[in-house]
Amino acid sequence: MGEFYLANEYWFAVFQLVTAMLGMGATLTPRDFREVLVEPKAVASGSVIQLILVPLVALAFISAFGIAGGVAVGIALIAAIPGGTTSNIFTFFARGNVPLSITITALTTLACLFTTPLILEFLITQYMPDDFTMPRAQIMTEIALTLLLPLLVGMLYLRFFPGTAADFSKWVVRASLFGIALIITGALSSGRLDLDAFGGENIALVAGLILTMALASWLVCKALRLSRPDSTAINMEVVVRNVNLGFMLKASLFPAIVGQPDAIGDMVLFTLLLYGVLQMLIALGLIVRGRRLARAA
């Protein structure tokens, strides 16, 4: 399994990303974007926090703690990718503004075609070898084909087959989760995930990053006097990233090669997986807090 995974890591990542975006698309209609017109302040605030504040927090962390190598690249990827599809579900459980969450997810997903390569170039070019050139055109092409195209196909499925769209979405999302499980299993069996090599300090840094992102988002929402449901949706969007896209970009930028250790790529993968676990724990806390505040209102 280990050698097979290393030889096909990119396609494992593509599979889980495409199925995730198909599932998201099959739950969206053009009407879901009405939030842009209904509450432009909340949509604009959430999008700016996602596209500007989060990368600035990542930059501050990388600079303040002297982070370099694979962990720096992993943090940059986390900052460059948009919110994940599960943020919409978690927002519902937290009694947040679900239409707002869907709108911000969709808008930042569309925007990431251009913003992701720009943010990556801004954050990590200086940490790469001198002969490294950010493959902006390649990243934009891969995002278009594996993120935006499946999203559109999913929306078309809902448009033409509304009776089965819910089941279709459910099964392709499950396939995506299975894809993530395969990535974890493959990485473990290949020996690429080494907890000792990653180190407790880096674990603390990634945990500190997600907590700082959540705190910064909460403070901005409070300063803007957004409603509790709107703030909950935005905070969830900031915390729950599209780690699926991160896996695909990692596999594209740092492809695993059988028999050739990759210190940077392995650390990037570990950083993304660790963030994926931590974001679920933080999201659970936001759900508990949101439900408690909703009952008290």
Image (cartoon, rainbow, N blue to C red):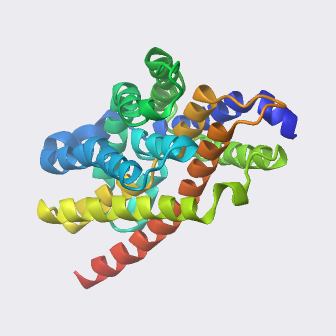
Q: How many numbered dots are placed on residues in this image?
A: 0
Q: Which of 208 and 129 is in front in this view?
A: 129
Q: Measuring 15% from the left and 40% from the top, which residue is drawn there?
A: 37
Q: Measuring 32% from the left and 33% from the top, which residue is drawn there?
A: 30
Percent of width and height locating residue 159: 44, 30
Q: Nearer the viewer, residue 241 or 37?
A: 241
Left or right: 74, with 256 as reference point: left
Which quadrant of the rendered structure holds the C terminus?
A: bottom left
| Quarter of the rendering containing residue 65 | bottom left
Q: Is residue 115 visible?
A: yes
| Quarter of the rendering containing residue 112 | top left
Q: Which residue lies furthest to the bottom in this view?
A: 296
Percent of width and height locating residue 289: 36, 76
Left or right: 230, with 4 as reference point: left
Q: Nearer the viewer, residue 184 or 262?
A: 262
| Quarter of the rendering containing residue 122 | top left
| 282 up-or-down from 87: above or below | below
Left or right: 258, with 143 as reference point: right
| 252 up-or-down from 26: above or below | above
Q: Can residue 225 be seen in this view?
A: no
Q: Measuring 14% from the left and 44% from the top, which residue is drawn there?
A: 40
Q: Nearer the viewer, residue 2 or 227?
A: 2
Percent of width and height locating residue 141: 48, 17
Q: Measuring 52% from the left and 44% from the top, which residue is drawn there?
A: 74
| 230 up-or-down from 18: above or below | below
